[in-house]
Image: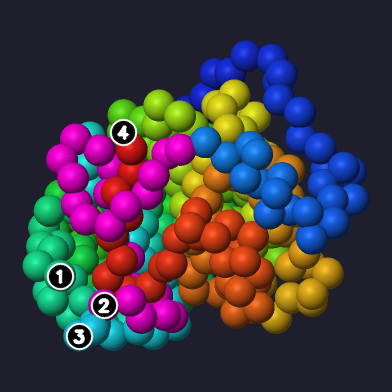
Amino acid sequence: METVSTKLRTGSNMLIHPKDRRRRIPLRILAAFAAAIFFTWPAKDACAQNRPQLTVLYDNYPFNNGLIAMNGFSCLIRGTEKTILFDTGERENVLLYNMTTLKINPAAVDIIMISHDHADHTGGLLSILAANKKAKVFLPDGFSDFDLLQRIQAFGARTFLVKQPTQLCKDVFSTGPMQGHGLYEQSLVIKGPSGLTLLCGCAHPGIANIIEKSMTLFQKRVVYVLGGFHLSSASETAISDTIRSFVAFGVAGVGAAHCSNAEMVLSLQAIYGPKYIQMGVGRTIALQ
């Protein structure tokens, strides 16, 4: 087992994170406020060369016909220096079926990053390792599924415990483990010319906290936030506060998946309009 403790070097924190102010922004004016601060960094369907593409392989929600939607999350990142599989869903047969249908070869994956140790994010991992002997596996320090750790090592996979914010490949990083709801979770950050794209598994540490940490680490704005937001049973107040934080931080586009509240999805669609990114199994988002 190898550990990773590469700490990112950043300058002094010059970013302003208006936590108090964001709670006082009425929802009825968020749309106008958002329109004023958003700039264009389009996220489009279709794969394009020489730029990052995110394809949802596993999600609670459908997008393309012919694929299986089920509780859990997995996303493939291509167009970066390395091909990265972020989380692996819950059932290996579902993950492999969706990958086969999308003509994605598990052997093409260079890096597997697991956000946290819940089964709906780790269930397909061993099936990928069975088909791929070269992939490196990055787990957050504090990963508590010791049986799975032993089984990963039995495959001979190079396994890294990420202790601090760490570069996975050119322009792609782990936030490092953050604690929330009794576990440790890492999120993935892609640096682009206009800012950061943040990909979360479940956001147990709090999606606003993850955004804030990412902005502090890189001294850049988080432009897109995608993935699970851990708000499946959240109150209306919690949902409103979360949306306020997105706007206050200047997030230009949002795609809610997996464990995100259906009411939150509707609210985000109303606030973000065409900047809301529908997620679901089979969705491919090309970043510029």
- Label whose residue precedes the other's in the sequence (2 or 1): 2
In this rendering, does residue 102 appear at all? Answer: yes
Q: CA distance from mark 4 to mark 3?
A: 33 Å
Check residue 66 in the rendering and tell me which mark sits there, or answer none: 3
Q: Does residue 107 sit above or below 175 in this rendering? A: below
- Label whose residue precedes the other's in the sequence (4 or 3): 3
Amino acid type at image mark 2: Asn
Q: Nearer the viewer, residue 258 or 82?
A: 258
Q: CA distance from mark 1 to mark 3?
A: 10 Å
- Label whose residue precedes the other's in the sequence (1 or 3): 3
Q: Residues within 10 Å of mark 2 (few under 14, many from 20)?
A: few
Amino acid type at image mark 1: Leu
Q: Is residue 57 left or right of residue 246?
A: left
Q: Nearer the viewer, residue 233 or 107?
A: 233
Is 49 contained in the magenta span?
yes
- Main SS of the magenta part reads loop
Q: CA distance from mark 4 to mark 1?
A: 25 Å
Amino acid type at image mark 3: Gly
Magenta stretch, residue numbers: 40-64
- Label whose residue precedes the other's in the sequence (4 or 1): 1
User: Residue 11: x and y, percent?
Assistant: 62, 14
Going 70% across and 58% down the picture, which residue do you hit? 243
Going 31% across and 66% down the picture, which residue do you hit? 283
Q: Contact (CB < 8 A) between labels 4 and 3?
A: no
Q: Secondary structure at mark 3?
A: loop
Residue tagged 2: 64
Q: Is residue 38 left or right of residue 148?
A: right
